[in-house]
Amino acid sequence: MQTTAPTEQLKIVIVGHVDHGKSTFVGRLFHDTGSLPEGKLEQLQKIAERRGVPFEWANLMDALQSERDQNITIDTAQIWFHTRKRQYVIIDAPGHKEFLKNMVTGAANAEAALLLIDAAEGVQEQSRRHGFLLNLLGIRQIAVLVNKMDLHDYSQERFDQIEREFRAFLKTVGLEPKIFIPIAAKHGDNIASLSANMPWWQGPTVVQTLDEFKISELPKDQPLRFPIQDVYRFDERRILAGRVEAGTLRVGDRLLFSPGNKVSTVKNIERWQAAPRETASAGESVGVILTEQIFVERGSVATLETEPPYALTKIRARMFWLGRAPFKKGKTYKIKLATQEAECHMDSLEKVIDASTLQNISRPENDQFVGRHEVAELYIRMKRPIAFDLHTDIVALGRFVIVDGYEVCGGGIIIEDSYPKRTSDGLHKSENIFWSHGKVTARQRAMRNSHMGCVVWLTGLSGAGKSTIATELERELFNLGKHAYVLDGDNVRHGLCSDLGFSPEDRKENIRRVGEVAKLFAEAGIICITAFISPYRSDRELVRKMMKPRQFVEVHVDAPLAICEERDPKGLYAKARANEIKEFTGISAPYEGPSKPEIQLHTDKLTVAESVAKIVEYLHMQDASAEVSI
Amino acid sequence: MDYLSKLENQSIYIMREAFNKFENLAMLWSIGKDSTVLLWLARKAFLGHVPFPLVHVDTTYKIASMIEYRDQLVKEWGLQLVVGKNEDVLKSGVTFPNGKATRVECCGTLKKDALKAVLEKHHFTGVIVGVRRDEEPTRAKERYFSPRDKNMEWNVEDQPPELWDQFKTDFETGAHIRIHPLLHWTEVNIWEYIERENIPIIPLYFANGKGERYRSIGCWPCTSPMKSNARNVRDIIEELRATNTPERAGRAQDKESEDAFEKLRRDGYM
């Protein structure tokens, strides 16, 4: 009897073509290692007898009615068994083509795989497909079991032939099994003990091979990756919740949050009912309190400033597709990577591969898609930047799933491409310089800057929050590496428009001049932010007409008059009420709200950071659809 | 990282995903060891808080000390409790202990239907449940995030793929998701963790003076104790490491027919 601490556990998956004996193998493995629950074997033998059918080892796993009827395991049932060395979780992945998504579910969670091949039928479609997918899913420890050797006279020649053929195939997909073992699962040959029927096989047995596999280690020595899962405010503390996916997090670390390039320092690592520690390593779910409060939300990935991830809107990937409907060019999907989610679409398709034959499938230019059970190499474009790494560098930030409607329909890994290098200050344009021949065009400017020049026109009552948002937006865009500049009402009135008063005519002229100046900024490639009450609809329409389509982004900074009056940051409402200021918008002069602004911000309900985030999101989407951001 | 910590961290991650993704989240609390461990893990995940209500389905046939233990923890830990009860069937008296229903029919109305009613009443779209894969074969097929349709039915043949900790969090209105943060734990892991964390567990699990203890607890007419001298958590761990008897051997409703439990689960039983 064991009385030691909990033993180590290894998760294994069992794959292979349908009817090549996976369930039978598992039943037998359980029996031969003494892992069966008491009475289970007798119970199933009795049921078989009552039904007048021969007892099948496979029934141990196939506990569901529908499976017993079809003799196919329909899902990744997980069960546990022991060897002398350790405990195993075994996933009986099914081989039927229909159930590939279950095989993927099982294999994605495993650390090692056993791939079964029927000695009589030899290498089949699913044998190859599973081999290919195991590699894509990142499983490197594999043993191939050549089963039903009893049906082939326990022939060494047959075994060698299958090993030669399959090894050659697996090599082409980059997979090298540790070993091939001849077995007859039904009779227990070479499972827990060496078979007398195959004196030519000197071992190891399946059980010995399993015990040689290694438990996968958590990547605690890699660069730090801490994706934010949620932000909690259950009490006075503001806690960033998340799991360290790679590396080690330490109190005092200066963290860079991507995308967005915000920086703050770890003040404390929070846990409940656990000894306080100043570090958290890969695999640990913790809470983090920062010294300086910054606006960070779910999806942000915290890293050290010296080891940032990529934060881009386009990735190159190898992807498998499980959805009934194909992954089509022109359709919008959702990508989930770590805790990030973004809308995405197929940018371009490099190749589609039949996973069982490895043949490239050619598709006409006007009908680009990845069909069910196909594998592809392609570019995917997101509506906003996401933080990621190459799968070969940091696994957890290098893989993703695609959601179509309500369903997870595909998964993939991010592969090598000429991604622009990131430097720690987030200015990642160095390898992306565009040379101009002749007159510099607006598009060339936009490509150089990774964003278009435009005018973000904030309109709204005094006290609605225009100047505050303008200043914050400018800072945020600056930190994102973009060129932005605020034209504020007060600074313009002191110079450019010092000759103007507040009559409707003067107000109109004021707005016209500001519009012309803002337009010049936009043409120069800058994001020009203006913060003027600009109460008359016709004035704003005049400015809109000066500009090119999409250059004018009207933002209604909208708060109820009562709230603006209560805020009254400059004491102007009080003066207006006391009749000390004439023609004050909202009190003694009208405010005409926009009928169709590009962005509407209810600043009585949104925080400044949330308002800014909405504008940034809009600009990102506009840049992404114009294909100027990377 | 040791093995129990791996299990713990994975469960915390799953619970935090559920809390982020569901507006109207609840957790089932059967008072048993598993859902009490789950409750402890919730407090780990949310740094001492339990930010959602606990649902207890009361058949009125629960062993009496279960309700006392429940109410005591609710008070001590400041929990929000919602109790579900099938009052109509209890009034009509069509139950197994009255001899007017089979065991499985009784589970169907007093547990499954009562659960359905309480979920509907409070519009819960996500329900955290403490089932484990090693408990019995149909639970072995579960996903961490497992959808139930409008009729609470489970389509076991067509489950969503679940890989790399990306879970099914998008679903049609009317459907709900069961979340199973303990799916990957085994019975002995539960006890090892109870020992490590010193979690208060209802004493029914420990051997009484007559050399009997409950290994799985539920309604008294359908749950019987097993022979055991395990008087504390350590004894139980050692007993379990040596046994080959299934955990639910003392639960009579599973045995009415070969697929009794499977049918109950397809229809929405936990």
Image (tube, rainbow, N blue to C red):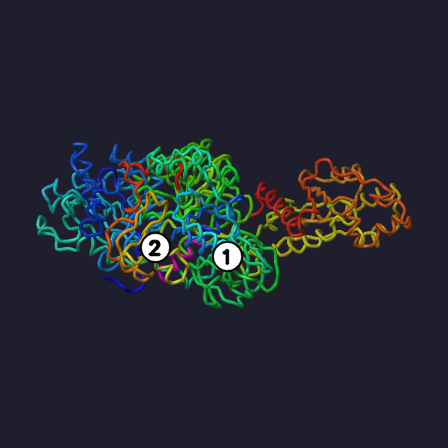
Residue A205 is one of the magenta-drawn residues: no
Q: Residue A527: tell me if it is visible.
A: yes
Query: Which residue position holds label 1?
Result: B77
Regarding mark 2 in the picture, which secondary structure is present there?
helix
Mark 1: few, some, or many residues within 10 Å (few <14, many ≥20)? few
Q: Quadrant of residue A46?
A: top left
Q: Position of residue A57 (x, y in %)?
A: 19, 42
Q: Earlier in the sequence, mark 2 or mark 1?
A: 1
Magenta-colored span: B1-12
Query: Which residue position holds label 2?
Result: B205
- Chain of the residue displaying label 1: B
Asked if both marks, 2 and 1, belong to the same chain, the answer given is yes
Residue A303: image tag: none
Asked whether B151 or A362 is in front, the reply is: B151
Q: Quadrant of residue A264?
A: bottom right
Magenta span main SS: helix
Question: Left or right: A317 with respect to A568?
Answer: left
Q: Position of residue B201 (x, y in %)?
A: 40, 57
Mark 2: few, some, or many residues within 10 Å (few <14, many ≥20)? many
- Please state which amino acid type lies under the numbered disc 2: Tyr
Q: Position of residue A555 (x, y in %)?
A: 70, 43
- Rounded to the nearest whole Å, what is the CA distance between mark 2 and mark 1? 21 Å
Of circles 2 and 1, the one toward us is: 2
Q: Position of residue A504 (x, y in %)?
A: 87, 41
- Chain of the residue displaying label 2: B
Q: Quadrant of the N terminus of chain A?
A: bottom left
